[in-house]
Each structure stands twice: as C-alpha cells, then as structure tokens.
Image (tube, rainbow, N blue to C red):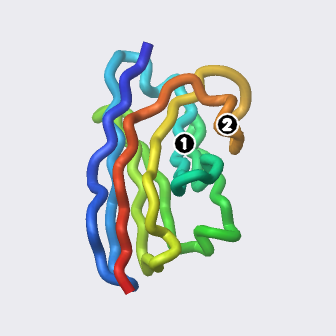
Amino acid sequence: QVQLVESGGGLVQAGGSLRLSCAASGRTFSSYHMGWFRQAPEKERRFVAHISRRGSTTYDTDSVKGRFTISRDNAKNTVYLQMNSLEPEDTTVYYCAAQSRGYASTRSRDYDYWGQGTQVTVSS
C-alpha cells in the first residue's frame, strides 16, 4: 500500500508559479506510474499530467498548454508538478495519484492510491 501526501499549494497571483510535491511512503515508489489530477467543486476529477515508471510524460495540453511540468525523484519517493504562468482558471484542489498496473493512464479510475489534495488559488 502507498500513502501519498501533497504539499506546496497556496495563494498566488496570476502569472505566478507554484511547485506541488507529492511524497509517497513505501519502498516501491519507482514501480508506480504517478499522476496529477484536479477537481473543482461539483465537477469531475480531471487529468492534468502523468509520469510513467520510466519517466515518460503526458499532459492535458488543452488546460496545461505547456505551462506545467511533471517530474519525479525516485530516490526521494516524490513526484512534482511545476506550475508556471498560473491563471485564475487553475484555481482548484490538486491531487496526486499512484497507478500500479498497466500503461500510465489519463483516467482517474485506473489509479489505485490518492493523496488528500492541496488547494491552489490564483488571484486575478
């Protein structure tokens, strides 16, 4: 079992940057695909980015538009989401997730473990 703890959220002005971190427990972090999702109130959880076990990455290009970068440090059991050029529309709760099987997915239902979420608020 994996426990995930996000950090790094907060309040930032439009155009600013934040780096989210997700620390994972356990010794098998490198065996998981890791993803970032976000969810606004009363809306579905939406894919933002994922990074596979081998380090390949995929983004929701419509929303991210080259502004976000996902990375992982297996030695630290941590996955990151660097968010630049933030917009008020990016305001929501961000979740990291771990997927144990199959190919790295963009669907939330394919992920096995979730963090508690971290709030990002972008002021205009």
x and y, in percent, of residue 22 in the image = 35, 41
Q: Secondary structure at mark 1?
A: strand
Badge 1 amino acid: Gly
Q: Which numbered marker is on residue 104?
A: 2
Image quarter in which the C terminus is found = bottom left
x and y, in percent, of residue 55 in the image = 55, 43
**Residue at 41% from the left image edge and 34% from the top image edge:** 115
Can residue 2 be seen in this snapshot? yes
x and y, in percent, of residue 6 in the image = 33, 42
Residue 39 lies, with reference to residue 66, above or below; the image says: above
Q: Quadrant of residue 120?
A: bottom left
Outermost residue to the top: 1
Q: Secondary structure at mark 2?
A: loop
Q: What residue sits right under mark 1 in the picture?
A: 35
Q: Quadrant of residue 16?
A: bottom left
Badge 2 amino acid: Ala
**Residue at 27% from the left image edge and 62% from the top image edge:** 10
Label 2 or label 1, whichever lies nearer to me, is 1
Marks 2 & 1, CB-CB < 8 Å contact: yes
**Residue at 72% from the left image edge and 32% from the top image edge:** 103
Image quarter in which the N terminus is found = top left
Task: Say few, some or many: other residues with alpha carbon within 10 Å of mark 2 (under 14 / 14 to 19 / 20 or more).
Answer: many
Residue 51 lies, with reference to residue 120, above or below; the image says: above
x and y, in percent, of residue 72 in the image = 42, 44
* Mark nearer the N terminus (2 vs 1): 1
**Residue 49 located left or right of residue 77:** right
**Residue 53 located left or right of residue 14:** right
